[in-house]
Image (cartoon, rainbow, N blue to C red):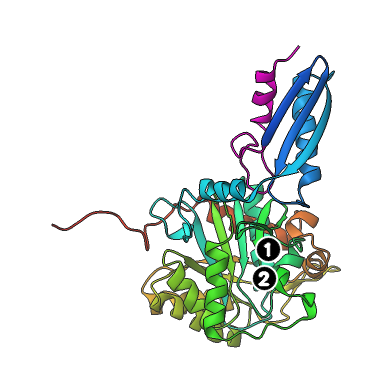
Amino acid sequence: MPTTADIYAALSQVEDPEIHRSLTELNMVESVDLKGEKLALGIKLTVAGCPMRDEITNRIVTAISNLDSNLVTQITFSVMTDQERADLRRQLKGGVDRENPFNAANSMTKVIAIASGKGGVGKSSITANLAVALTQLGRKVGVIDADIYGHSIPRLLNANGAPTMVEGMMMPPQGYGIKVISTLPFKRGGVSEPVAFRGPMLHKMLDQFLCDVWWGDLDFLLIDLPPGTGDVAISTAHLVPSSEVIVITSGHEAAAEVAVRAGVLAHHLNQKVIGVIENLSGLNCPHCGEIIDVFGMGAGKELAKLLSAETKTDVPVLGEIPIDPNVRKAGDSGIPIVLADPGCASAAAIIAIAAKLASAPRGLVGQSLKVSPI
């Protein structure tokens, strides 16, 4: 028969699905009452109506069953007091009331902003699919939908829920294991309600996404920027100086001419442009296999050449993604193409790009080296 200590040991292996730390570490285990084969557990949730209650229940039942399948477990849920929630926030934030964790000297998160010169080139779709592909490679990923006016990431990643609030700290909704935050949950009118923000409010919103969301330990934070060279692109560089940039273009020359401005702006703001992705790059005919040049092809190479000259660095083409109607269908259904059809040409191209990003070493751009010339 297991002991009370065995029960605590089993619960120490059960993670809160939002915070990704054990129930015992988060002081969520209120009581353990073991009498023979009957086990009564008291578990404290962070908030009433916690959306992860069922998932927490399933994880506890599985852990106890693995310990002893004969135990009959009864779980009683309560809610943390205001003081306990405040203590939890301080515990998670390391005693700091409010900070941008991605600017911390010890941050190991690679922050990549996905930019484009104009809309309609598939920037958000690529962001969502890259996030999933990186997760499949074992990386922990978060996504900020910084396209405040035209957010689409929640739908693409099936993460339409609202964040759970804990003493002003947001536990973001998740899709496919990816933490996602956007303006969608904060609009009373839902998807159809427009966002009428000017510059300072856009900056504040991005700052809140960075500082007030519980991101945990991420390997990658992808920021889906709005198209162009406006307020959000500038704020991203100021708020996360160590962030890097990938520029998306479609295959025709005019798109590359517009996209180069996004890359040059990033360079002027001391961000490193780590590559170019050419999307919508030719259509494979389903009947004969011939590549049909629908929107033009080759602009990615031209854009990389222009950015290399402007930034005096080597800006590579990370990949060329062909046109595939199934990418659109998969996105509309909230199942990214790398999950819906991982063997298709477009998914294979995205997966290859993710592998390049996952294997790239973390640079020192924007980081304090804590050395002095004196």
SS label for mark 1: helix
Give the percent coordinates (x, y) of residue 187.
73, 75
User: Badge 2: how crowded within 10 Å, few (<14), some, or many (20+)?
Assistant: many
Inter-mark Cα distance, 1 to 2 = 6 Å
Magenta span includes 241: no
Q: Please identify the quadrant where the N terminus is shown.
A: top right
Q: Name, please, the residue furthest toward the left.
A: 374
* Above/below status of 35 relative to 260: above
Magenta stretch: dominant SS?
loop
* Rendered location of residue 293, percent (x, y): 71, 79
Please name the amino acid that badge 1 sits on: Ala
Q: Are marks 1 and 2 in contact (CB under 8 Å)?
A: yes
Displayed quadrant of residue 242: bottom left
| Residue 217 at least partly seen | yes
Kindly identify the residue that appears in the image at 86 percent across and 68 percent down. 287
**Which residue is pictured at 37% across the width and 57% down the height?**
364
Q: Is residue 316 left or right of residue 280?
A: left
Residue range of the region highlighted in magenta in the rendering = 1-28
Q: Is residue 24 magenta?
A: yes
Mark 2 belongs to which amino acid? Ser
Q: Which mark is residue 128?
A: 1
The local secondary structure at tag 2 comes to helix
Quarter of the image containing the C terminus? bottom left
CA neighbours of label 1 inside 10 A, class few (<14), some (14 to 19), many (20+): many
Q: Nearer the viewer, residue 151 or 34?
A: 34
Query: In the rendered view, would you say 165 is above or below 256?
Result: above
Give me the residue at 69% from left, 79% from top: 150
Residue under label 2 = 124
Image position of 320 with respect to 232: above or below: above
